[in-house]
Amino acid sequence: MWINDKPMTTASETHSYTLWFFGLPDVYFLEDYCPAGTTLTVGENTFTLSNLNADQAGLLGVIRSLLNLGCKPISLL
């Protein structure tokens, strides 16, 4: 579908995201909740999930899981 000569995006389209959070994820978080190819970089009290390829529902699921673990979002790109 096209709107104003631009393709219409849908919720099921996959995009690559980078998420930066305060806190630390569970040891098995990357393996249990993130799609293959996602990179976890851990800092002192923060971590970054990059190359997270997901649709809107998948992204929301990852964010909700992190919030349930007590992690606080800093940046979502």
Image (cartoon, rainbow, N blue to C red):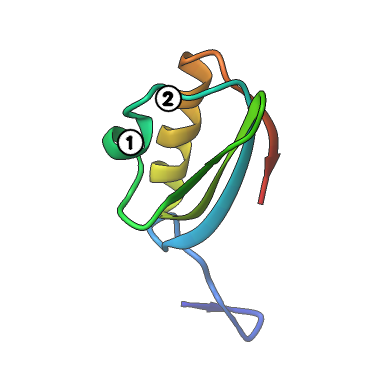
Does residue 72 appear to the left or right of 57 in the view shown? right
Give the residue type that dot 2 points to: Ser
Q: Where residue 5 sits: x, y (%)? A: 63, 86
Relative to 49, say whether 33 is above or below: above
Does residue 22 appear to the left or right of 32 in the view shown? right
Disc number for residue 61 = none
Between discs 1 and 2, the one toward the N terminus: 1
Image quadrant assignment for residue 27 = top left
User: How many tags in the picture?
Assistant: 2
Crowding at mark 2 (Cα within 10 Å: few <14, some 14-19, many 20+): some
Judging from the image, what secondary structure is the residue with disc 2 in? helix
Which residue is the site of mark 1?
Answer: 33
Judging from the image, what secondary structure is the residue with disc 1 in? helix
Crowding at mark 1 (Cα within 10 Å: few <14, some 14-19, many 20+): some
Residue at 31% over, 28% down? 28
**Residue extending furthest bottom?**
5
Does residue 52 appear to the left or right of 32 in the view shown? right
Give the residue type that dot 1 points to: Tyr
Q: Where residue 8 sits: x, y (%)? A: 53, 71
Q: For this rendering, which residue is in front, 2 or 43?
A: 43
Relative to 17, say whether 23 is above or below: above
Q: Where residue 35 sits: x, y (%)? A: 32, 50
Label 1 and label 2: CA atoms lie apart by 8 Å
Relative to 13, say whether 41 is above or below: above
Q: Tell me if label 1 and label 2 are in contact, CB under 8 Å.
A: yes
Disc number for residue 65 = 2
Q: Where residue 15 sits: x, y (%)? A: 49, 62
